[in-house]
Image: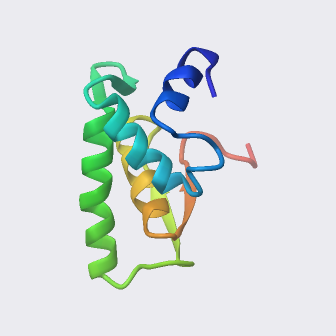
């Protein structure tokens, strides 16, 4: 965790002992940092609030399709805001995010 935000995180009572899951951490950060920049890639940006809200919507969609705790969910996006949102959605419901990438091959 970057040193420059550790004091602010403590101020909102978000510590490794209080955030038991990645999903709890994303929700707490969305509340604490709201409009601040969370993810950027070129011209694409995403605030902490947008990350939390988007991941909540996608998580609800996954649950409606029968994906839940313990399921494995492949994520095939380039690194960037979409990848971060989907990772947060998958972990939010207790599923296991399986990052997939087409950018590099292990066999080349």
* Residue 72 shows in the view: yes
Q: Residue furthest bottom?
A: 66
Q: Position of residue 51 (x, y in %)?
A: 32, 42
Residue 9 falls left or right of residue 1 = left
Question: Compared with residue 91, is residue 19 higher up or lower down, i.e. above or below?
Answer: above
Residue at 52% across / 70% down in the picture?
A: 95
Q: For the N terminus, give its image quadrant.
A: top right
Question: Compared with residue 54, is residue 57 higher up or lower down, i.e. above or below?
Answer: below
Q: Position of residue 86 (x, y in %)?
A: 39, 53
Residue at 50% across / 64% down in the picture?
A: 74
Q: For the C terminus, give its image quadrant.
A: top right
Numbered label tally: 0
Q: Position of residue 38 (x, y in %)?
A: 39, 29
Q: Residue furthest right?
A: 107
Residue 41 falls left or right of residue 105 = left
Place residue 80 in its image quadrant: top left
Residue 41 falls left or right of residue 3 = left
Question: Compared with residue 66, is residue 14 higher up or lower down, i.e. above or below?
Answer: above
Residue at 49% across / 47% down in the picture?
A: 25
* Residue 83 shows in the view: no
């Amino acid at each position: 965790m970057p040193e420059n935000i550790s004091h602010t995180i403590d101020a909102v009572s978000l510590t490794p002992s209080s955030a038991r899951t990645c999903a709890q951490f994303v929700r707490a950060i969305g509340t604490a940092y709201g409009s601040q920049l969370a993810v950027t890639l070129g011209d694409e940006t995403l605030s902490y609030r947008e990350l939390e809200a988007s991941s909540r919507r996608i998580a609800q969609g996954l649950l409606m399709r029968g994906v839940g705790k313990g399921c494995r969910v492949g994520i095939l996006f380039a690194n960037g805001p979409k990848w971060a949102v989907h990772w947060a959605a998958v972990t939010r419901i207790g599923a296991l995010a399986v990052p997939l990438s087409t950018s590099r091959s292990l066999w080349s």
